[in-house]
Amino acid sequence: MRYAILSDIHGNLEALRAVRADYTGKADAALCLGDTVGYGAEPLACVELVAESAEAVVAGNHEHAVAGRLDLGWFNRYARVAAEWTRDRLDDDHRGYLAALPLVREVGDATLVHASPAQPEEWDYLVSAEDGFAAFAHFRTRWCFVGHSHVPAAWSLGSSGPEHHPGVVHLPRERGRRYVVNVGSVGQPRDRDPRAAYALWDTEAGTVEIRRVAYDVTTARRKILDAGLPRFLADRLAAGA
């Protein structure tokens, strides 16, 4: 089985469509790690496309914010404006769908969670080597796929010791090792590469590949500005920051 694993789409329909085009024919199904909404100008279209096409979806902090399950005071001013704007553009059915998404799912030998598997409702970021290694005690599968930081990375534990791989591109499974993989962001990368990021997980080969896909950043930026959202949210797409 081959899965496309998407996270942090953030209402960026151009990026989502480009990623879907890239994994068509390469993946048998899609999984989504949350934050389908927030920041971008087309939350409704992104929610519907993910709901229709993904085999499993978990909630991110932006879903909880839009659904009224997370205090907007948790966010910086740009994220707060985007969450309020997004909430007003979703109807009760869509907000109810987002509110009902689980925080954690298991699919085969993988745990899916937006932030950390340790207290996922606290929305902790896995960034440093120590962050990732501390997470292993909180899931039981071989793999754990996360998003939230918008930066691809991987951590693994095994008999030969811990390993941390910032900016991982290709990760082969090794016997006796377990893995945490941050798949990056489809709609708002923050590793200075503006291309959309997602992961391909081949369960039989035991490999994870982080793929980068160019998309129409100009159109995505224009839609944010036309919507009246903060210019910062548009400008950061071009910088990948």
Image: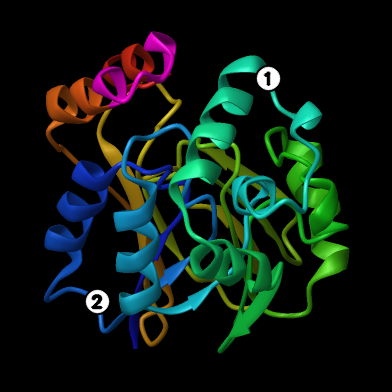
Q: Quadrant of residue 187?
A: top left
Q: Is residue 119 above or below residue 72?
A: below
Residue 164 drawn in magenta? no
Looking at the picture, which amino acid does disc 2 mark? Ala
Quadrant where the N terminus is found in the figure: bottom left
Instruction: Depth check: give the residue in front, 83 or 204.
Output: 83
Foreground: 26 or 66?
A: 66
Q: Residue at x 18, y 54 (%)?
A: 17
Quadrant of res 161:
bottom right
Residue at 19% from the left image edge and 43% from the top image edge: 14
Q: Is residue 21 visible?
A: yes
Q: Secondary structure at mark 2?
A: loop
Task: Say whether residue 189 is left or right of residue 130.
Answer: left
Q: Nearer the viewer, mark 2 or mark 1?
A: 1
Q: Which residue is mark 1?
A: 76
* Residue 143 disc label: none
Q: Magenta stretch: dominant SS?
A: helix
Using the image, determine if residue 41 lies above or below residue 47.
Answer: above
How far from the left and from the top, in percent, is residue 13?
A: 25, 47
Mark 2 → mark 1, Cα distance in angstroms: 36 Å
Q: Are marks 2 and 1 in contact (CB under 8 Å)?
A: no
Q: Is the residue 24 above or below the residue 122 in the image?
A: below
**Res 152 seen here:** no
Q: Residues within 10 Å of mark 1 (few under 14, many from 20)?
A: few
- Residue 165: horizontal and vertical position, in percent? 55, 42
Q: Name the residue carrying label 2.
A: 27
Query: Along the horizontal axis of the image, is 95 left or right of 132?
Result: left
Q: Position of residue 192 (x, y in %)?
A: 37, 19
Residues drawn in magenta: 224-233
